[in-house]
Amino acid sequence: MSDKSFEQAVVAERSMLVRFARLHLQEDAAEDAAQETLLAALQNPAGYSGKSALRTWLVGILKHKIIDVLRKEKKYVQAGPAEIGDPGDFDVLFDDTGHWAEAPADWGNPAETLQQAQFFDIMDFCLNKLTPVMARVFSMRELFEFEIAEICKELKITAGNCSVLLYRARMQLRLCLDQNWFEGRKA
């Protein structure tokens, strides 16, 4: 990839980076984190080895920028208790023995899927369908690999509340990805 095409490809990912950062940061901080990610990538093009998709590499840089901001400024959104709706919301997914009523769709090779830019668009769409608190808790745990205790401390929620939020986020993401990504890929 030439220097010019690399630069164009990196800059083309700006809006995705800003959307991702907005899940975790205030508007201005999200813009700054995305901009810092672009600058870091453009200042070190040799850092991109091509072993992963460019988008994956950029999100990896952005994750570190977001963590730096969150830890430095401690600007977490205060989360209240999980909104407990109908407890049977996800009961239809399981049979009487607690097993899947219908096995989840075969998601194929996860590493291969992550290479596909289209998947990130659908994942972004699904994450944005979550409530802000659910998206934040899910991202902190699954993307930034925070410990449950650290999430609870920073968001001032209980471990039980955190578990409920994670469960609901995972179930909603599973349903959304099944409908919007994997369903269309079945043979």
Image (cartoon, rainbow, N blue to C red):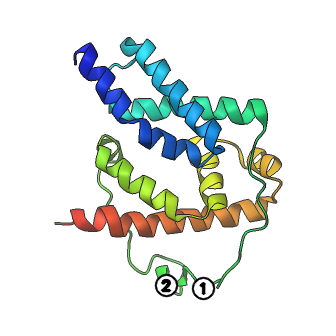
Q: Is residue 1 left or right of residue 124?
A: left
Q: Quadrant of residue 184?
A: bottom left
The amino acid sitting under disc 2 is Val
Image quarter of the C terminus: bottom left
Circle 1 sits on which residue? 88
Q: Position of residue 132 (x, y in %)?
A: 63, 59
Q: Position of residue 30 (x, y in %)?
A: 59, 39
Q: Position of residue 67 (x, y in %)?
A: 65, 34
Mark 1–mark 2 CB contact (< 8 Å): yes
Residue depicted at x 69% and y 62%: 163
Circle 1 crowding by C-alpha within 10 Å: few under 14, some 14–19, many from 20 = few
Q: Name the element at disc 2.
A: helix
- Looking at the rendered structure, which numbered label has been put on residue 92? 2
Q: Is residue 9 left or right of residue 173?
A: left
Q: Is residue 74 left or right of residue 6?
A: right
Q: Name the element at disc 1.
A: loop
The amino acid sitting under disc 1 is Gly
Name of the residue lying farthest toward the front = 28
Residue depicted at x 52% and y 68%: 171
Image quarter of the N terminus: top left
Q: Position of residue 107 (x, y in %)?
A: 33, 58
Residue depicted at x 55% and y 83%: 91
Q: Quadrant of residue 73?
A: top right
In the picture shown, does residue 89 fall above or below 42? below
In the picture shown, does residue 100 fall above or below 129? below
Q: Is residue 133 visible?
A: yes
Which one is nearer the viewer's eye here, 92 or 6? 6
Distance Cα–Cα, label 1 vs label 2: 7 Å
- Looking at the rendered structure, which numbered label has been put on residue 173? none
Q: Is residue 52 visible?
A: no
